[in-house]
Image (cartoon, rainbow, N blue to C red):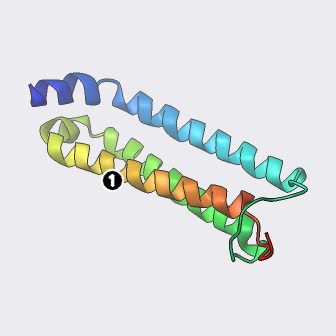
Amino acid sequence: WFKWYHEHAICHKIVRRFGTQATIVLIVSGMEFMVFVFDPPLQLWGVTYWEPKNRLLKFVYLRLFVLLGNHLLWLLSEFSEWMKEHPKSVQGLLLLNSMFDIVAVYFSYEALFISNEHEF
């Protein structure tokens, strides 16, 4: 059952799914970056100790790491025979990539939208 599920659910159209995912992450990250650069919020909320000049740089680096992971999975999905023959490795890799993406996206949002004011 595990092998059947992996071949017919996980690997089914996986190249197309990874390509779509990478494209959507690129478009959304670009839109968020442009909105923040051209229309920065007047008042930020929260407390953090990051320097304001490094906010966009941290956002860009974290999102580039997410895009790099997505593109590496997309490239790896081109070798569909390897993915079908190693279900545990592939699903572990997908899990690790998802966990990294969640953490990186969280910190990229924190870099953009959390304030540097200590008095908040």
Q: Could you tell me residue 66's position as x and y percent?
A: 51, 54
Q: Could you tell me residue 51's position as x and y percent?
A: 74, 77
16 left or right, relative to 110: left
Total numbered circles: 1
Where's the N terminus, which quadrant? top left
Q: Element at badge 1? A: helix
Q: Looking at the picture, tell me which residue is in the foreground, 105 or 7.
A: 105
Residue drawn at point x = 11 percent, y = 30 percent: 3
Residue drawn at point x = 33 percent, y = 39 percent: 77
Residue at the far left: name it: 1
Q: Does any portion of residue 110 appear in the rendered image?
A: yes
The residue that label 1 is drawn on is: 96
Q: Looking at the picture, tell me which residue is in the foreground, 1 or 48.
A: 48
39 left or right, relative to 57: right
Q: Looking at the picture, tell me which residue is in the foreground, 83 or 31.
A: 31
The answer to which quarter of the image holds residue 18 is top left
Residue at the far front: name it: 119
8 left or right, relative to 3: right
Residue drawn at point x = 24 percent, y = 49 percent: 92
Residue drawn at point x = 73 percent, y = 73 percent: 54
Vertical order, 54 against 2 (above or below) = below
Q: Looking at the picture, tell me which residue is in the foreground, 115 or 90.
A: 115
The answer to which quarter of the image holds residue 80 is top left
Where's the C terminus, which quadrant? bottom right
Q: Could you tell me residue 16's position as x and y percent?
A: 43, 28
The answer to which quarter of the image holds residue 85 is top left
Q: Does any portion of residue 68 appear in the rendered image?
A: no
Amino acid marked by disc 1: Leu
For label 1, the crowd category at 10 Å Cα-Cα, with few meaning under 14, some 14 to 19 and many 20 or more, is: few
88 left or right, relative to 55: left
Q: Could you tell me residue 90's position as x and y percent?
A: 23, 44
